Image: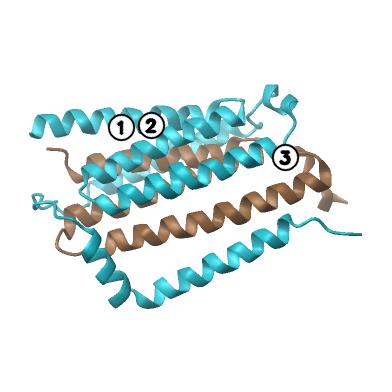
Amino acid sequence: MISLSGYLTVGALLMALGLWGALARRNVLGILIGIELMFNAATLNFVAFNRFLHPDRLWGEGFALFVIAVAAAEAVVGLALVLAVYRNIKSVMLKDLNLLKG
Amino acid sequence: MTVLTQVVFYMLAVLTLVPAVLAVTVKNVFHAALFLVLSLTGVGGFFALLGADFLFVSQILVYAGGITVLLLFIVFLSGNPKDWAERSLNGAWGVAGLVCAFFISLLTVLFHYLPEAKPLAEALPTTGRLGLLLLRDMLLPFEAVSLLLLSSLAGAIHFSKRKHP
């Protein structure tokens, strides 16, 4: 039987991959993909802790539902911002987002 | 049964982690979004393995269905195809890798202090109990999330509306 630490290891690896993607990509959309991976790692940890430590209650799964809803709101606003930026400067690469440098 | 669970767990781990690696490394953002769909489906499989049936369905519907389709639309609407052939990583990828390796090692140390996991109880259908939880104990956050979704809808319309000069 897989123990709790198996699920937590998968969650930690997923979180580290998402963090690396958010730090190292040059494309705004790539950074958003990394952030989605981090949200999923957190959700997986919530559900695993719920199942293994408190199987009689569902608070972890309820929080995971809220994480999914907040991630959907974040994706909608973030992608609308990417689209607005693209309309103004015709690029989604981070090296072109330097308007505030003066 | 336990052997089957282990086999399914390792297959789901491969299905989740390999597309996640590809999603953060490939140059083409369109391909990265498609790998993201695979990885999110793998996380949904973990939910099913953990007995969270309602979360499994909402993961497939909201994430693999909704958010990634939105992401693919934005990939099509923005960005030049010549960006996809350029270098996809900035100069700090080595430092970022070090940060992530430190993060992983910190977490593996923390795993030793976890409480002993109880043996798994029977997995029951969760949808009805989740509905009672959301509308009884979590009513205030539930309404707050509905307000958040409404405001994000208004914000998305505001940001993506064309400004008439």
* Identity of the residue furthest to the top in this view: B85
Q: Amino acid at mark 2?
A: Leu
- Assign a secondary structure to mark 2: helix
* Identity of the residue furthest to the right in this view: B165
Percent across and percent down for residue A39 are 44, 50
Looking at the rendered structure, which numbered label has been put on residue B13?
1
User: What residue is at 35 percent from the left and 57 percent from the top?
Assistant: A64
Letter of the chain in brown = A
Percent across and percent down for residue A100 are 82, 53
Q: Which residue is mark 3?
A: A92
How many angstroms separate mark 2 from mark 1 (CA)? 6 Å
Same-chain status of marks 2 and 1: yes
A102 relative to B56 in the view: left or right: right
Count of residue discs: 3
Please say whether residue B73 is visible from this viewpoint.
yes
Report the front residue among A67 and A15. Answer: A67
**Which color was chain B given?**
cyan
Looking at the rendered structure, which numbered label has been put on residue B17?
2
Label 3 lies in what chain?
A
User: What residue is at 48 percent from the left and 35 percent from the top?
Assistant: B36
User: What residue is at 28 percent from the left and 60 percent from the top?
Assistant: A60
